[in-house]
Image (spheres, rainbow, N blue to C red):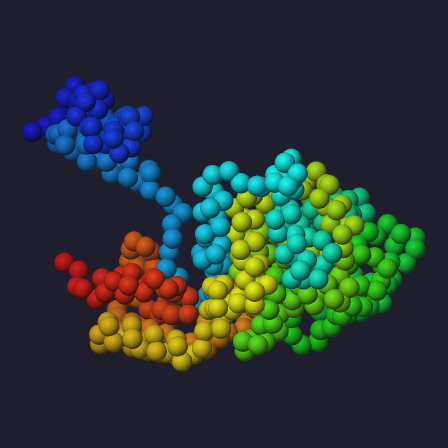
Amino acid sequence: MKMRLRDLPSVDRLLAQSDELVAAYGRPLTTHAYRDVLDAARARLRGQANGAAALTPDDLFAQARQRLASLTAPSLRPVINATGVIIHTNLGRAPLCEAALREVAATSRGYSTLEYDLDEGQRGSRSSHVEALLTQLTGAEAALVVNNNAAAVLLMLAALAQGRGVVIARSQLVEIGGGFRVPDVMQQSGARLVEVGTTNRTHLRDYQQALEPPAGDEVALVLHAHRSNFKQIGFVSEPELAELAGLGRPLVDDLGSGALLDTAAFGLTHEPTVQESLAAGAALVAFSGDKLLGGPQAGIVAGQRALVDRLKRHPLARAVRADKLCLAALSATLLHYLRDDAVTQIPVWRMIATPLTALEEKAHAWAAALGPAASVAAGESTVGGGSLPGETLPTRLLALNLPAPNALAARLREQNPPIVARVADERLLFDPRTVLPGEEAALLNGIRSLLVPSE
């Protein structure tokens, strides 16, 4: 039976028969979905002079339900990270610890003391919630939290060097993920870039020459940018941080990764810590909250009180300030460092510290549960997130030896929850290091779906 335009039901008629959709999605969204479905049907009918196959109200209902489900499904979804990349930028960087999750839930459920002083009964400061913790941990005089590390660097340059020069080595004019470059951030802040040295070698005398009068009188800061996402090897050299701190200008260290613990204790190269930077004489240190620190996305500035106070008073500080959920999660994370249990309680450090024997035991258990298509292979985990470039940790991988591994990886990403694995040497690989507690059952169920022949 062919259908004509006049045979299509009205939106009102369809709505009258769609109590289920209206209850689930609301009348406005359901109306919008039916209009889209009818518009598509009309376009199809107009394109076929002799009409098209009939669409029943049930057909239109099914199409509308599918559109509504697609429209309202969240695109920001939890995933199982089986890649072995611990701080996976594309997957949200550091997962939060349980204490942080509890504090976020408690703070977001109702009102809070975000900017309220209970003792005085009047307005307070949002920075007070984490400043004391940060100064206790790092030895800094003062601290400020903004929404990410790029914002922290931008704020420091705008507040302390607008219209003046900032000296930095050419080897540190880095680009981070997303194409953001230090020179562009500096230009946006209103500071003037003063490059010294060469791509591979910069000497203390290069800085000293840039600070000589009369041109040097217009220099406000010396900026040091830690190369946290790449390495320089070979014929390279740079002054020590303590040497830069003695040049007579405030030294600002863009440390990036935010390590508060010594990574060398876990078999990795030593990553400079915030405490070391401040002890070397940096006036301000900027670092991320969601990398090696293991907390929420945040940019943290720690250092001299007089300079931090200038940042707090700058108009840009309000535009880039951290919200209550960030501060709640960050304070809970920092408390684990003060309690000296970060390695067991903060997921990033727990993953880094997981012994190879435990990973091997888990990989073998997974393989035994999955049958002959699964085996265990040696592999490497990476820290990721622009931290410790080139550094790896030995791990044991679950390997699936099945045809078309890339197609199978795509099917895993369609699971609920999606599973993100990696493909290498024509095998589908899963690293137990980055699979969180409580995710194993869903992971194994998702993998089993690949082992069942499709009809």
Image location (x, y in percent) of residue 152:
66, 50
Please name the residue shown 45% across and 77% down the image: 355
Q: Quadrant of the C terminus?
A: bottom left
Q: Is residue 344 above or below residue 55?
A: below
Closer to us: 116 or 33:
116
Expressed as whole percent of the image width and height from the top left, the position of residue 133 reads: 63, 56
Residue that appears at 53% across and 66% down = 342
Residue furthest left in the image: 1
Q: Residue at x 48, y 56 (%)?
A: 99
Q: Tell me if residue 299 can be seen.
A: yes
Q: Position of residue 434 (x, y in %)?
A: 42, 66
Q: Position of residue 120 (x, y in %)?
A: 66, 38
Query: On the rendered structure, is 422 left or right of 203?
Result: left
Q: Residue at x 68, y 48 (%)?
A: 154
* Quadrant of residue 337 within the rendered picture: bottom right
Q: Is residue 240 left or right of residue 24?
A: right
Q: Quadrant of residue 37?
A: top left
Q: Residue furthest right?
A: 214
Q: Quadrant of the N terminus?
A: top left
The quadrant where residue 407 appears: bottom left
Q: Decide if residue 246 is on the left or right side of residue 151.
A: right
Towards the viewer: 220 or 306: 306
**Disc count in the image?**
0
**Camera sees residue 33:** no
Q: Residue furthest front?
A: 119
Q: Is residue 45 above or below residue 410?
A: above
In this rendered view, identify the residue nearer to me: 33 or 357.
357
